[in-house]
Amino acid sequence: MAAATAAAVILSGCQAQQPITPDSSSATAPPTSAQTDEPTAQESAQAWADETFGTFEAFTVTGSGAEKIVFPDDAKSGFYTITWAPDHYANEQSGAQVYGEDGTYHEAGMADYVGDSASVAYGLDPSVGPAGWIAVGPGAGEWSITVSPVSALPALPETGGYDAYLYAGDEQPVVFSTLNSGRLNVRQFNGIDPTDSILPQQDFTAVGTLLAGPSVVNVQLESVSPWTRSTN
């Protein structure tokens, strides 16, 4: 509704005051409804992750050496971040590994890294059944593991480490490569089947096609050198 400015004019003598007709040119336009910002690509990927893999309250477990961490019923899909004490990799069997409820080995859930911290997504491939637990190796020393929902993953960057990410971009040919040494293993998951669109190579690069998102990308490597991502 246009806002009219109420005004009065005082006429000479005893003539009554008369209202002035408002100037239509000065009327205020009706307010428009507030426009909602469109979600970003990362926000859309996070919503997809919650719908596809579910969500739960993140939790942290600390320990030393061998231990078995059983996933709660609402955390059969997610990602875990493990932090080791310095020089842990000098010991044998210092990594962590996800197993299925039936005791099967889930290769995608392995975190065996020469650096001090790594993250990996698990329970993303329905063909291998639900994830059951994380087994930490006896040579791991002091460690801390935080288990989080898939939607808490960061967006896939141009360079990174032994980590898991959300990807919301278009299909594109890519090359993942390290600066010094260490082969890469890159896997992409869409919640329906494992795409395995990027395969490990012997020349320290992973070459393939990054399929259109939303999806989860696991990057596992043997070197502390960061990897870089470029168009093939």
Image (cartoon, rainbow, N blue to C red):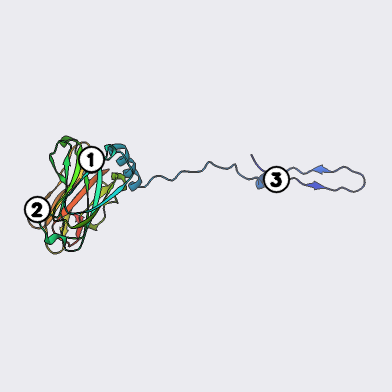
Label 3 packing within 10 angstroms: few (<14), some (14-19), many (20+):
few
Specify the quadrant of the image occupied by residue 130. top left
Left or right: where 152 falls relative to 207 = right
Mark 1 or 3, closer to the camera: 1
Alpha carbons under labels 1 and 2: distance apart: 22 Å
Alpha carbons under labels 3 and 2: distance apart: 76 Å
Dot 3 amino acid type? Asp
Q: Secondary structure at mark 2?
A: loop
Residue tagged 3: 23
Label 2 packing within 10 angstroms: few (<14), some (14-19), many (20+):
few
Residue 84 in picture, x, y percent from top left:
21, 58
In depth, the one of 64 and 109 nearer the eye is: 64
Residue tagged 2: 201
Dot 2 amino acid type? Gln
Point 72% across, 44% down: residue: 22
Specify the quadrant of the image occupied by residue 157. bottom left
Point 10% across, 57% down: residue: 92
* Mark 1 touches mark 3? (CB < 8 Å): no
Left or right: where 6 falls relative to 228 = right
Dot 1 amino acid type? Asn
In depth, the one of 58 and 6 nearer the eye is: 58
Specify the quadrant of the image occupied by residue 48. top left
Q: Secondary structure at mark 1?
A: loop
The label on residue 134 is none
The label on residue 190 is 1
Asked whether residue 232 appears in the rendered view, the answer is no
Q: Quadrant of the N terminus?
A: top right
Residue 219 in picture, x, y percent from top left:
19, 52
Left or right: where 196 falls relative to 46 = left
